[in-house]
Image: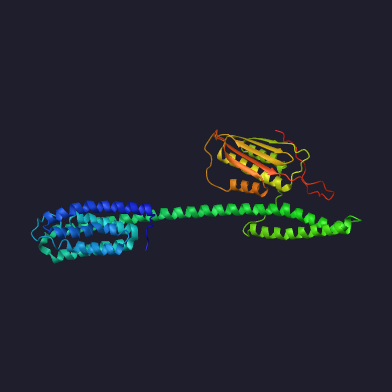
């Protein structure tokens, strides 16, 4: 059975509307039945209240409402005076007919086509039986016309409510599908970000730990004349590195997912920012990039990757959300941190809007390095991203490998 699900606010509106219609119909039905059909006032009031109140009751108790209405609608024409003016429609008076159509429409809309059809057929049959029980109450032709009009109006109400309820259900299903699609898109983006972070951890941290473990394990063979205490210290370093690698593998197992294929492209760093900016310029973006000289500061690969990703995301957001605006990127490198500043002016045309994981990803990358990142409007219609990524300057070591990235030079514009 198809039902239309309404939220509490809409249900309250439906109740309020049906109650208002019921009060209006009752205020009309009681005097008409008493004055024009000769029905005693108490009977007019009680039966009218049942007929006019049934649509309101159908919102929460449809079966009770259908039974109550059917009984009252069957009895109401029977208690009419036998000598009432035949010019008035019988067995359905106009207010009762309107209440009948309202009930059929409400039941069909709220509870599905089957309860609505039952309401329609039961009351049409009941009015026909009432007409057969009191054949002299009205002219046969007028009585037949009244029955046809009542059945037709109720059938139209049934069909209209059926179409409207179907449209409402389709809208609700589309809304649910959009929510599911948005949730799936959000989950996919989050999984991709986690996989990318896992790959970077594997390529940078795990590789460095492996180098440390190998260097510490082979130090006693490569460096002659080591004291026993130094050898033991190197063995402890190697054991700690091996334990850290085990924990790293566990962490990677949590971050990685089977439905994400591994990316084999090398990780980008600060040296790759000019190429990134040039690629965006080729598609029409107005980007100015300045990369400061690192001097003697050696930036770890993990910081380089985070800096590249943050700048990449910030520039992409600027191009996407503020098309035509000038984008200025400044990368400063000092002994303490890599400092990023990405600013774009107000958009010159309408850009894309929507929620994503870009800002969250930038915040997470900065947090992983114990850095800081802030992003927000600049007060003049533009957007400003400022980040500081700490640089842990390693002491010079004769065991340094070729994996250390080169010192950066200032980008030429």
Image quadrant in which the C terminus is located: top right
Query: What quarter of the picture does the N terminus occupy?
Result: bottom left
Q: Residue furthest right?
A: 225
Q: Position of residue 353 (x, y in %)?
A: 52, 43
Q: Is residue 280 visible?
A: yes
Residue nearer the viewer, 285 or 326: 326
Q: Is residue 253 left or right of residue 216?
A: left
Measured as percent of width and height from the top left, residue 333 is found at 72, 39
Residue 130 placement, left or right of 406: left
Residue 318: image quadrant is top right
Report the front residue among 134 and 23.
23
Q: Is residue 117 above or below residue 192?
A: below
Residue visible at 24% across and 54% down in the picture: 22
The quadrant in which residue 229 appears is bottom right
Residue 107: image x %, image y %?
31, 59
Does residue 158 appear anywhere in the picture? Answer: no
Q: Residue visible at 77% across and 56% down?
A: 210
Q: Residue at x 74, y 44 (%)?
A: 299
Q: x%, y% of residue 293?
A: 74, 36
Q: Is residue 383 depicted above or below 161 in this figure?
A: above
């Amino acid at each position: 059975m198809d039902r239309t699900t309404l939220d509490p606010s809409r249900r309250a509106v439906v109740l309020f509307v049906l109650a208002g219609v019921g009060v209006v119909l009752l205020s009309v039905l009681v005097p008409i039945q008493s004055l024009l059909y000769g029905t005693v006032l108490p009977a007019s009031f009680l039966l009218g209240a049942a007929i006019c109140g049934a649509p309101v009751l159908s919102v929460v108790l449809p079966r009770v409402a259908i039974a109550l209405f059917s009984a009252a609608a069957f009895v109401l024409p029977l208690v009419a005076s036998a000598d009432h003016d035949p010019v008035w429609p019988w067995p359905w008076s106009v207010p009762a007919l309107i209440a009948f159509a309202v009930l059929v429409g409400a039941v069909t809309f709220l509870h599905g086509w089957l309860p609505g059809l039952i309401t329609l057929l039961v009351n049409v049959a009941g009015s026909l039986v009432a007409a057969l029980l009191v054949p002299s109450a009205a002219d046969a032709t007028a009585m037949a016309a009244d029955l046809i009009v009542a059945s037709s109006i109720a059938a139209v109400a049934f069909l209209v409510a059926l179409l409207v309820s179907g449209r409402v259900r389709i809208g609700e299903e589309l809304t649910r599908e959009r929510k599911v699609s948005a949730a799936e898109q959000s989950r996919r983006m989050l999984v991709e970000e986690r996989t990318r972070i896992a790959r970077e951890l594997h390529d940078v941290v795990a590789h460095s730990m492996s180098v440390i473990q190998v260097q510490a394990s082979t130090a006693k063979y490569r460096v002659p004349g080591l004291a026993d205490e130094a050898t033991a210290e190197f063995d402890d370093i190697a054991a700690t590195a091996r334990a850290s690698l085990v924990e790293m593998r566990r962490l990677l197992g949590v971050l990685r997912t089977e439905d994400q294929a591994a990316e084999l492209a090398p990780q980008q760093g600060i040296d790759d920012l000019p190429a990134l900016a040039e690629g965006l310029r080729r598609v029409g973006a107005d980007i100015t990039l300045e990369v400061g000289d690192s001097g003697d500061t050696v930036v770890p690969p993990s910081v380089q990757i985070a800096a590249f990703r943050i700048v990449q995301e910030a520039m992409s957001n600027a191009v996407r959300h503020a098309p035509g605006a000038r984008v200025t990127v400044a990368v400063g490198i000092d002994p303490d941190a890599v400092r990023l500043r990405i600013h774009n002016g107000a958009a010159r045309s309408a850009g894309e809007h929507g929620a994503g994981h870009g800002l969250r990803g930038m915040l997470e990358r900065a947090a992983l390095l114990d850095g800081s990142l802030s992003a927000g409007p600049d007060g003049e219609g533009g957007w400003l991203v400022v980040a500081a990524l700490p640089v842990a300057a390693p002491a010079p070591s004769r065991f340094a490998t070729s994996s250390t990235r080169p010192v950066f030079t200032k980008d030429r514009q």
